[in-house]
Image (tube, rainbow, N blue to C red):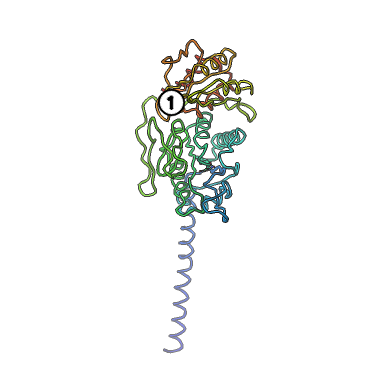
Amino acid sequence: MTRDAVTSARHQHRRRWMLAIPLVCFAFWSGGIGAAAQAAELPRILVLATGGTIAGQADPRATGAYKSGQITGEQLMQSVPGLDKLAKINAEQISSIGSQDMNDKVWFALARRIQDAFDKNEADGVIVTHGTDTLEETAFFLDNVVRGDKPVVIVGSMRPATAVSADGPGNLYEAVQVAADPRSRGRGVMAVLNDKIQGARSVTKTNTTSIETFSSANDGPVGYVDTAGGIRFMAQAPGFRRTTYQLPAGEQLPRVEIVYSHANMDAVPIEDAISHGAKGIVLAGVGDGNTSKSALDALEAAAKKGIVVVRSTRVRSGFVTRNVEVDDDKNGFVVSEDLNPQKARVLTQLLIAGGVTASAELQKAFTATW
Ligand code: ASP
């Protein structure tokens, strides 16, 4: 090749590069813009972490032992691959406790933060990470006080992050799928665990350790979710209504005790609740909300003193019915309908806090869903 030919080949090569560089830059620039535009379109999910086994870590000294609430919400979300494709996630820590220690203070903080995020349009959906022991109570409390139709999903796990075959990452992924889906709007607070979406009113923990523990005895799951098949919502009963109550000022609900009924029951637990200043008593009755004659007499005396008495049941499914074996009209009692004792307690607390103490009005609130 002559000197001239080499020079012209070099020039051609340089010219090609000069053309190619802007093209490459454009490709990067447009790719960046595309990714940014895609990220901007993703639903904004606020994660509020409270602790629980889902944030638990094994105790290296003891097989099977672990401590709840050791990992932050942010670490939790980062540990699940692929979430960035589903949503723009922002995590905040509300508490780091096992849910056996769940309390009014955390409940009020959660309710206020969720409402604020929705009112200021900071999020399209909220996920609460929670221990499974009292998950159903927090779900029901939030369902009763958070206004609006944006989805609130509560999620936990039965095994800590360090366990073989931990269930937390899958549950978190599915919780984001549900919270980010526009079809989840207007369905109230939902619990998402082990491929099931369950309503706050009916979901309950039924097994101490199995990952298949949550079920909705009276009405079944609201829907199903899995990473491959997506979300399938079941038909919702027509006429279903959700009532929300004003969150009381401060950070404490009135004292309402649950009294568990059993064979050979006497009045002592009821008298005890009264002497400790209970404003309400929920009976976890036998069968259709029944209890012994002496316990019933004590409850009747309590109602006469203005203490709210709600008959629920220790039986896992069914409804507690008025005026069957107990004369509720005469005694001024309320029946919990489908609400288990721990949820009947939450509703009783909210009603008393709102100044509702007359039995007829209380009863209306318990049946308002139908
Ligand atoms: N004790 C734990 C808790 O409720 C159990 C769990 O999360 O599964 O925080």
In the rendered view of the protein, which quadrant contains the C terminus? top left
**Mark 1 is on which residue type?**
Asp
Observer-nearest of 196 and 310: 310
Q: Looking at the figure, which quarter contains the N terminus?
A: bottom left
- Of all residues, the one furthest to the top in this rendering is 330
Residue 167, x across and y down, in percent: 45, 49
Q: Nearer the viewer, residue 340 or 253?
A: 340
Question: How many numbered circles does the render carry?
Answer: 1
Disc 1, SS? loop
Q: Is residue 222 above or below residue 70?
A: above
Which percent across, then down, holds residue 79? 51, 54
Q: Quadrant of residue 324?
A: top left
Q: Is residue 145 above or below residue 100?
A: above
Specify whether 201 is left or right of 65: left
> Which residue bears the numbered disc 1?
338
Between 10 and 355, the one nearer to me in the picture: 355
- Residue 10: give x, y in percent of width and height: 46, 80
Judged left or right of residue 234, residue 153 is right
